[in-house]
Image (cartoon, rainbow, N blue to C red):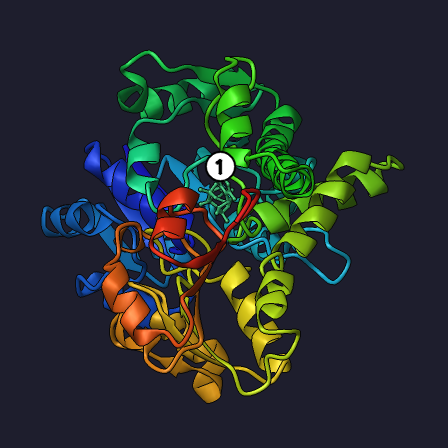
Amino acid sequence: MKITVVGTGYVGLVTGTCFAETGNDVTCVDIDANKVKKLSAGQITIYEPGLEKLFERNLKEERLFFTTSLEEGIKDAEVIFLALPTPPGADGAADLSFVLNVATHLGKIMTDYKVIVDKSTVPVGTAEKVTAAIAAHCTTPFDVVSNPEFLREGVAVDDFMKPDRVVIGTMSERARKVMGELYAPFVRQGNPILFMDEKSAELTKYAANSFLATKISFMNEIAVLCEKLGADVDMVRRGIGSDDRIGKRFLFPGIGYGGSCFPKDVQALVKSSEDAAYDFKILNAVMDVNEKQKLFLLPKIKGFFNDDLKGKHFALWGLAFKPNTDDIREAPALYIIEALLAEGATVSVFDPEAMSNVKQVLGDKIIYAEHQYNCLENADALIIATEWSVFRTPDFNRISSSLKHRAIFDGRNLFEVTRMKELGYHYESVGRMP
Ligand code: UGA
């Protein structure tokens, strides 16, 4: 099949590459000429494990193309995916201007039947708006489909190639047939393609992310309660997770959810609810809990240093909002760093992938270490903000010989509390007794 993907951000690039991998001819369109030049030359623009290999192969075998021209990009295409940004506007609602501008442009240049697919996370009702924007300038038949994406950063290729489910929102039989064929290679193991109406598909995406964010905020509150009551959140997590109805996954407490999706999508669903004159109480609480949770470690750190962080120096491991990505959007680490700096402390940081992204945001406000152990030099204590695997079994001798105090504040519960006690550390984590 001939496919166009408009937008070569995270979702667009993964979508385009994975569809090329199943034998389709894919043209990716982006207005950023510099990005298109880089991608055409074989230079991948995001860090995502496993993607580069597929990208290089499909580029070489000429199934993957990049262009800045929408006209050129959609020539002969049967399906056009819109994988464009939908950032939160000033009022928290998703800003649809990128999506609707492209839809209007498509309306002006389409000359034969095409399926236009909303891949971006968009509020309920967007398929209708996209349809109207195209139809305003177009007389040829077309269908608009809502096909939300559920991939996770860090495991995006796997998630895309073997999705738990594919959601396809359209009442058009013609479009269902095209989309069903396109996705057939991805659901060979028997996972479902769920056909539904456009609005239900749009809401499914927000409901999924908001439910997962709720699970995390719930566990973060249980962790707070564990500390207050003297329980251990690891035990409680196992205790409840073994009930199938609750499930083992996504129950890990920490220093809050971040990234480009959960914060934005929860906020957007709250806004959609408000617009529909409904007060979505749980989600407001989910956001409040998450805001607090990002600075969960701060009182513990201050407590250890008698409420005076002035002149103290901290080593911080982990900047990305989660492991296996260089994405620092809404990363809890950044909130912690800003809070420490505001208290008059200095900070050295290390992250396996996200250093250059943080440099662009924080510049010379902090020190960038070349190695996780260099980061510890002259530091009073170590703070862990992201659970990269390389931090899981560190050389504790090197840590203790570098730090001024044997103190670790761990926002991701990487180590056993009893082991840390044996090693002589002042070790504080989330929801476990020190
Ligand atoms: C999330 C969803 O998991 C994907 O299904 C969805 O497609 C994507 O958003 C999106 O809308 O594009 P992602 O943001 O890549 O994916 O990251 P997750 O792995 O879901 O983690 C989100 C946040 O939750 C991270 O900050 C992570 O540290 C936190 N988290 C996750 C916890 O604090 N505890 C957990 O048990 C799990």
- Type of amino acid under label 1: Val
Q: In the image, residue 175 lies at what x, y percent?
A: 47, 23
Residue 416 appears in the figure:
no
Location of the N terminus (image quadrant): top left
The residue that appears at 14% across and 52% down in the rendered structure is: 56
Q: Tell which residue pokes out farthest to the right in this image.
A: 277
Q: Quadrant of residue 33?
A: bottom left
Whole-percent x, y for residue 283 in the image: 73, 39
Q: Which one is in front, 337 or 23?
A: 337
User: In the image, what residue occupies the spot 68% across and 39% down?
Assistant: 225
Mark 1 highlights which residue?
Answer: 117
User: In this rendering, is residue 32 above or below 78?
Assistant: below
| Residue plotted at (69% across, 55% down) | 292
Q: Can the viewer see residue 262?
A: yes
Q: Quarter-wise, where is residue 423 in the image?
A: bottom left
Secondary structure beneath label 1? strand
